[in-house]
Amino acid sequence: MSSPGLPESPAEVARLLGTTGYLADDSLATVAWLALRMQRPLLLEGEPGTGKTSLAEALAAALGQPLVRLQCYEGIDATQALYDWDFPRQILHLRALEAVGAHDGTASVEEAEKSLYDERFLLARPVLAALQSSPAVLLVDEVDRADDEFEAFLLEVLSTYQVTIPELGTVTAATPPLVVLTSNRTRELHDALKRRCLYHWIDHPGLEREVEIVRCRAPEVSAALARQVVTLVQQLRLDEGLLKPPGVAETLDWARALTWLGTTELDLASAATTLGALVKYREDSDKVMAALDRVLAR
């Protein structure tokens, strides 16, 4: 059963993602296609830098839909996700009403209060904006950083794709947005939210896949240098016990930095001077510096 405007198969999803520079394997393309067809949220977990956020961005670009991003953080609540009222504009509006009422004597307290909560004063936050603009892609990024209460709020919204604004009524998405939730697994999410979603774990790509990603996303990097960089990064992830192993984004940054410096073949000097593009902790930098001579000699 097909829906207008939606990819016909997982292979079509992979092809469309490829046009944006995002290379998805069969399992990831399949779960993304199922999320579209089944109108279910997609929960992506994995190490930082494995392409979870980039997938939502690529899906929005591939589908030609707006991307609405909700960045989660400790202490976020429903107000930051749903809506707020434009208080300064409401005050200006109230003063204008007072001035008009004082002039012609037609001011009504009840009418003034009602006009203060008109839709023109509504500030739509990401969840409401996604419902209003759907079809859209709603990215709920790093949901593991939010607390249990916010998770419960998300579960309620994702069950109905509607929110109620007491002063205006209920807003329901004409078409449910594609919701992509990402988690770095700093804490476990509750089973209720997981059951609502389709789930996929994104791991660091294998050697050949990462070389292909670098060649696709950074075509200015030579094939030989791309393979050298990816081979070294893969060894560092496996062997060096880094606090934050470099993700694909860091691999791309490092390859580009080396290319900008005119490096055609990775050596100890060029690797050491560009480490700031690859590792972001002093402890990791020290470990990599100590390992470079040994690793490059392999």
Image (spheres, rainbow, N blue to C red):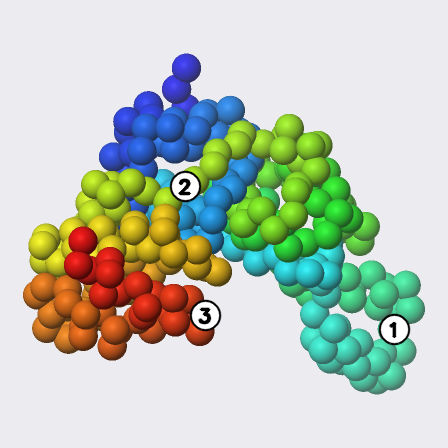
Q: Nearer the viewer, mark 1 or mark 3?
A: 3
Tell me if label 1 and label 3 are in contact, CB under 8 Å: no
Vertical relation: 160 (above or below) 64: above
Image quadrant of residue 266? bottom left
Residue marked by disc 3 = 283
Q: Nearer the viewer, mark 2 or mark 3?
A: 3
Tell me if label 1 and label 2 are in contact, CB under 8 Å: no
Side of 284 relative to 219 (left or right) = right
Mark 2: amino acid: Asp
Separation of residues labelled 1 and 2 (CA atoms): 63 Å
Residue marked by disc 1 = 107
Side of 146 relative to 94 (left or right) = left
Residue marked by disc 2 = 203
Q: Could you say whether the residue bearing mark 2 is in a helix, strand or loop? A: loop
Which of the image's four quarters has the N terminus?
Answer: top left
Residue 287 at least partly seen:
yes
Label 3: how many residues lie within 10 Å, few (<14), some (14-19) or many (20+)? few
Separation of residues labelled 1 and 3 (CA atoms): 67 Å
Mark 3: amino acid: Glu
108 or 55, which lies in front? Answer: 55
